[in-house]
Amino acid sequence: MSTVTVIGRGHSGTRAISHTLYASGVFMGRTLNSSGDKIPPEAMYDACRILAKYVKWNGGLSWDFSSLHTMEIDEQFEALINSYLEDVLSNESKHRGWKIPETTLVYPWILRLFPDLKYIHWIRDPRDCILSGHGTDDLRRFGVEGPLTDDLRKRRAISWLYQYQIMQSTPKPKHYILIRFEDFVLRQEETLSRLEDFLDIPLARIIVRPDAVGRWRIDPGPYSFEFLADAMRENGYSEEL
């Protein structure tokens, strides 16, 4: 039996991998919404607010996640996660898992609770990622302290950066693969082959739309923020994409 989860910000195209896993016979929870999220989400949302209490905001765009990797995990957090995942953890399918973007907000403790899971790190060019709204756009909704702004696109960009930083601060899992949404769309066979080797199962092919890549090019903006430049370079995003 193997269990997989997807770590990636909302509007990163994570529904594509959730739908792929579901179509491939992976049990992804009793109830999914149209985005492939395991619902109801309330227990996960409450767990996010508990973990956020232990993240230190240094001011600006800097957060300290270090205590999350060593402190005792909050018992209420663990109970909430077990409640949210009850249907997945009790399922006896050979392959099971879940996807909901808010898992990214609690990633350090998910990894500590479930070190043997297979983790798919999913990332998308932030210029495309911030074009549409998501529940995690306002981090304060989940108890995360950070800079305030009335600029909606900037708020989304800050959320993208925070979630990228929490991913980067967390020790790499035993079973880990990094997938760019753009590669899944533009090089689907090559990317699915990598995922099949990682998951050790054949994967279904779903319809993908090449026009989902580079939408920022025809958007009036704003979509580019200097504070995202380092993360973009680290992941191979440039204007030549």
Image (spheres, rainbow, N blue to C red):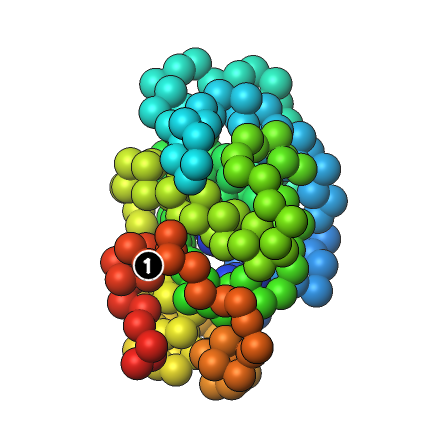
Label 1 sits on residue = 229
Say left or right for 182 vs 100.
left
- Classify 10 Å Cα crowding around label 1: few (below 14), some (14-19), many (20 and above): few
Considering depth in this image, is 166 or 57 the residue closer to the camera? 57
* Residue 108 drawn at (x, y percent): 41, 33
Q: Which amino acid does label 1 sit on?
A: Ala
Quadrant in the rendering for residue 124 = bottom left
Q: How many marks?
A: 1
Above or below — where is 20 with respect to 122?
below
Left or right of residue 100: residue 118: left
Q: Which of 192 and 64 is in front in this view?
A: 64
At which x and y percent is residue 120?
Answer: 40, 54
The residue tagged with tag 1: helix, strand or loop? helix
One can see residue 29 in this view:
no
The answer to whether residue 230 is seen in the rendering is yes
The quarter of the picture where residue 41 lies is: top right
At a point 50% along the width and 54% down the height, the residue shown is 157
Residue shown at 61% from the left, 18% from the top: 76
Q: Tell whether 23 sits left or right of 225.
A: right
> What is the quadrant of the C terminus in the image?
bottom left
Residue 106 at x, y = what percent?
50, 35
Q: Relative to the observer, which residue lies in front, 226 or 4?
A: 226
